[in-house]
Image: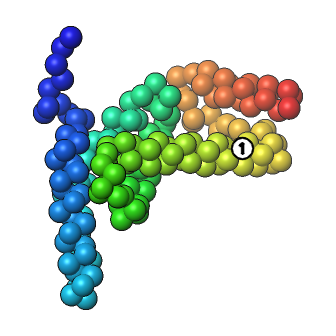
Amino acid sequence: MAKRKSNAEHYVNNKEFLQALSDFKYLVNQAKERGDPRPRIPHYIGECFLKIATHLSYKPNFVNYMFREDMICDGVENCVQYIDNFDINRGNPFAYFTQIIYYAFLRRIEKEKRQLDIKSKILEQSGFDEVFVSDGNILDSSDSDYNTIKSNVHQKMTYN
């Protein structure tokens, strides 16, 4: 069995990640005691969040979405939002933040589906002929893409 490289593009060392989180938690507690402003999240922790989110986005159930970058951003944002909820004593930061990112991805997919439904309802209510008015300059070479989109919309409207 091939051994995994520790310097792979999306590899996160769980022990180093846990240590970095522990150090950060200590700095946050110190700042709280002194009344200082909260310290920034270290670059390494942010890099780990990004690596986890990016690698998770390549999984088969997420790879083909057009809004994959938005999913990654949502995942990283949620990790930053919930970093204080992580319990250092429980141990596995990789699993904890992977779950946060996974559910952020699912929320983004639902949000995009709702937006698509809204767009299709607006299109349906306004009438697709008004939306697909061609002035002849859209595709100088051919109107095949235009006609394909128009026929797909027409089929959806007749079957619904």
Single out the residue that lies furthest toward the front: 89
Residue appearing at x 67%, y 47% in the figure: 114
Residue annotated with mark 1: 117
Q: How many marks?
A: 1
Left or right position of 141 against 121:
left
Seen at 55% across and 30% down, the residue is: 139
Give x and y (percent) for residue 111: 61, 49
Residue at the top extreme of this rendering: 1
Which residue: 31% across, 45% down?
A: 92
* 154 is higher (above) or lower (below) than 108: above
Give the quadrant of residue 57: top left
Residue 118 horizontal side relative to residue 54, left or right? right
Q: Position of residue 146 (x, y in %)?
A: 63, 28
Quarter holding the N terminus is top left
107 left or right of 2? right
The three-letter code of the residue at mark 1 reads: Asp
User: x%, y% of residue 156?
Assistant: 78, 29
The picture quadrant where one finds residue 152 is: top right
| Residue drawn at 25 percent across, 47 percent down | 48
Give the answer, above or below, for where 56 lies relative to 142: below
Residue 37 visible in the displayed image: no
Q: Position of residue 28 (x, y in %)?
A: 25, 73
Could you say which is closer to the camera, residue 146 or residue 76? Answer: 76
**Which element type, helix, strand or loop, lies under badge 1?**
helix
In this rendering, the answer to whether 32 lies above or below 65 is below
